[in-house]
Amino acid sequence: MCLLWKNSGSADTDRSHRVVAVDRAGIRPCAGFQAHDLVTPMRIRVKGYNEAARYTAALPPDGALDLTEGGTIEDLMDTLAVPRSLFTELVILVNGRCASLTTALRENDGVVFFVALAGG
C-alpha cells in the first residue's frame, strides 16, 4: 500500500512530502509514484437499517466515512465488512435513487442500505 508521508518537522519543503510503501517489512520509498499519483479520499454518508444496521453501528452519528475517490458500492460494502453472501439481499439507495454494486460514488453522496424483507 502506498501512502503520502507528510514530514511536518522538515525545513526542506521539497522533501517534506514523500510517497512511501507500508507493509510488514516496514516503511520504505514507494518506487514509481509521486504525490500527485495518489488517489484522494472522499467523504460520504452511510446508514444501514434493520439487519444491515450492525455494519454502520461503529460510524459517527452522521454516518460519515472516507472512501477512496472513484470507489463503488461494492468497495463500500467491503469496507464495512458486509458479507458477500448478503449482497444479493440488499436494497441500496444513493441520494434516494436505487443503486447497484457497480454504482460509482462521489463526494458527499448519501448511501442507505437495508436487507429486503420477506413477509406473508
Image: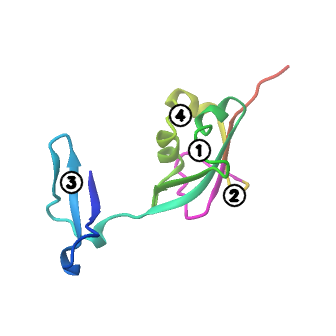
Based on the picture, tell me whether residue 103 belongs to the magenta stretch: yes
Identity of the amino acid at label 1?
Leu
Q: Which residues are magenta?
A: 97-111
- SS assignment for the magenta stretch, majority: loop
Task: Write the residue at 58% across / 57% down.
Answer: 44
Task: State which tag comes first along the sequence, 3 or 4.
Answer: 3
Residue carrying label 4: 82
Residue 63 in the image: state x and y as whole percent.
Answer: 63, 50
Residue at 56% across, 34% down: 87
- Mark closer to the chain start, 4 or 2: 4
Between the C-alphas of marks 1 and 2, the distance is 18 Å
Percent from the top left, x then y, of residue 37?
29, 68
Q: For numbered disc 4, what is the local secondary structure?
A: loop
Residue to which mark 3 is pinned: 21
Q: In the rendering, which numbered label is found on residue 95?
A: 2
Amino acid bearing label 2: Asn
The mark nearer the N terminus, 3 or 2, is 3
Q: CA distance from mark 3 to mark 4?
A: 27 Å
Q: Nearer the viewer, residue 89 or 26?
A: 26
Q: Nearer the viewer, mark 4 or mark 1?
A: 1
